[in-house]
Image: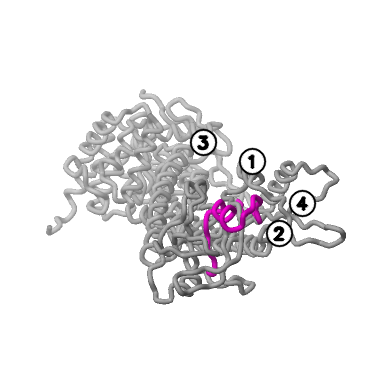
Amino acid sequence: MRLLNLFKIATKAIILNKTRTLLTMLGIIIGVASVIAMLAIGEGSKESIRTTISSMGSNMITIKAGADTRGGVRQEASVMESLTLSDYKAIKAQSTLLSYSTPVVEGKGQVINGSSNWPSSIYGVNPEYLNIKVVDLQSGSMFTDAEVQTASKVAVIGQTVVDNIFPDGQEPVGQMIRFNNIPFKVIGVLEKKGENTFGQDQDDVVIAPYTTVQKRILAIDHLNQIMSSAISEEEAPNAVLEVSKILREQHKLTDSDTDDFTVRSMEELISTFSSTSEMLTILLVAVASISLLIGGIGIMNIMYVSVKERTKEIGLRMAVGGKGSDILMQFLIEAILISITGGVLGVLLGLGATVFIEKFLNWPTSVAMYSIVISFAVCAVTGIFFGWYPARKASALDPITALRYE
Amino acid sequence: MSKAIIKIEDLKREFTMGTETVHALRGISFDIKEGEFVTIMGSSGSGKSTMLNILGCLDQPTSGTYEIDGVRVKDLSRNELATIRNEKIGFIFQSYNLLARTSAIENVELPLLYNSKVNSEERRERAIKALEMVGLGERLHHTPSQLSGGQQQRVAIARSLVNNPVMILADEATGNLDTRTSYEIMALFQELNKQGITITFVTHEPDIATFSSRTIVLKDGEVMQDYENHNIQSAANELAKLPKQDD
């Protein structure tokens, strides 16, 4: 009953002073909305920068057979035949930190189409290769797992190969080409990727099912390497350790044996990635803290002033029999209603602004759940506290002092 | 003899201002009986305001006793004082102190909102009745800005009546009004007093005192005079004597 009355009093006071309520609420709305929008822009940029770095294959992990020493002469790693399909299967089955893996066999040769020919490399892989290298197809499609199993003679070729063996600008997809005299049907063309940092042309490749390359071109059973991608850049070092452990078991190496394989991650790219990420995170925290601080101070001011100017009203309410606790409860209910409503409107406005920025300004945005929770919580708590605190002070005054307050 | 609703004995109130002690009230004793219309007079600095605050349970005496309707006020907590203000005293202020943008009836309902024994229907009924008693039955939904000063003070009077107090306590209730409106308000007070309502009116205007049944004059924190008024003027008659306004 008493609480119901106080609730009525509070809602009446809110409705009666529409302008004051609206202005107070506006402080909270802007506070919450700006934090959400700022963080959405920040998170969006961070995501997009991370994706850009990731597209360089920064989470890639390569596994090669280790170098061996024969009669004092160090042998080239590719001479070793210690990496096998069962290693790949073991890694695929046991690893928890890898998202994609493919066996890799590679060879060199001549690509021929009619009277045109071009020296290039062929990579035998499975369809996950595209995900690991973060490359898309420009046209056509990638071969399927079924085509890998049946060792189909299909190939996906890079732009440089296209330019050299289809000089007339024919559509390569659907055409038959030959690699070292083995016919392949071109089923897709890779997106242009350009040169890598060592000046190697990444578009000068032919990609085919590894089974086909093993059997028909190289006539080998082993693999040259296994390529994988870690679930994230942060987990790449752990993935390296995990893969090493799996391979040591697989190769039945004892503690005293050295690895007969090498597992490498893209250390330089990873460190670029993590230092960039870290910097962006610090930037975001700074932006969020400053926005919250400014929003909080705004809310504090307007709440404090709007309650302070009602000191006289508080005096009157006490003079006609309102207890200190009644007054406090009324202002607390008012502050809660205003803060929560303002907070909810702020979240909506923030989300709306984010959509607007994304749609019309084409900025990448990403609304983080934490930004909604934190901004709402901070603004609501600030609003409620500074709606309550001056009321508490006023209700501790003598009613007469409060009544005479100007 | 009707019973005393206010009993004051040797009431003292001291304020400490820095190192000095100000004796605002220096041992005051009097009773107010049910149905009396008392004016408390005095110039500024006489202890009038302090007296009013203590009578209104807004302030506590330093020593001495104050009883209202059988309740000893000394040693009550702030919350208990609030309950007494709510149930036993009706306040009227010089500056009306109505809630802005709030209709007359809602202003009058205000004290009852803090009394959980009264439900919303009864609250509305009592508020309408109180407004009818002060002659504002037609202006229930007017807000203070739509009412004249006199009408606003009538709303304040209705608000003081609504909780059926044992005493109405008015602080310079006519101080902001012109003579004509003052007399109208005083006529209303006299009428309410005739219906048995006890009124204590704090003022510094001598002509107000002529409408009351008893006057207590304070000076330097002591009662200088306390006399029954045997020749009570009728505010209604005085109002009739005023020159007609051409409106």
Q: In this rendering, does residue B144 appear at all?
A: yes
Q: Quadrant of residue B199?
A: top left
Q: Quick one: label 3, few (<14), some, or many (20+) residues within 10 Å?
A: some
Q: Which mark lies nearer to you, 2 or 1?
A: 2
Could you say where residue A379 lies in the image, as x and y percent from the top left? 49, 52
Residue A133's tag is: none
Looking at the rendering, in which quadrant would you find the N terminus of chain A? top left
Magenta residues, start to end: A203-230
Helix, strand or loop at label 1? It is: helix
* Amino acid under disc 2: Ser
Circles 2, 1 touching at the beta carbon (< 8 Å) = no
Q: Which mark lies nearer to you, 4 or 3?
A: 4
According to the picture, the residue beneath numbered tag 2 turns out to be: A78
Report how far apart the C-alphas of labels 3 and 1 lie in the structure: 73 Å
Dot 1 or dot 4, earlier in sequence: 1
Query: Residue A381 versus residue B201: which sits nearer the camera?
Result: A381
Looking at the rendering, in which quadrant would you find the C terminus of chain A? bottom left
Is A216 in the magenta? yes
Query: Residue B69 versus residue A383: which sits nearer the camera?
Result: A383
Q: Which mark lies nearer to you, 3 or 1?
A: 1
Residue B78's tag is: 3
Q: Which mark lies nearer to you, 1 or 4?
A: 4
Evaluate whether label 4 is on the same chain as label 3: no
* Amino acid under disc 3: Arg
Q: Quick one: label 2, few (<14), some, or many (20+) residues within 10 Å?
A: some
Residue A260's tag is: 4
Report how far apart the C-alphas of labels 4 and 3 lie in the structure: 85 Å
According to the picture, the residue beneath numbered tag 1 turns out to be: A94
Helix, strand or loop at label 3? It is: helix
Q: Which mark lies nearer to you, 2 or 3?
A: 2
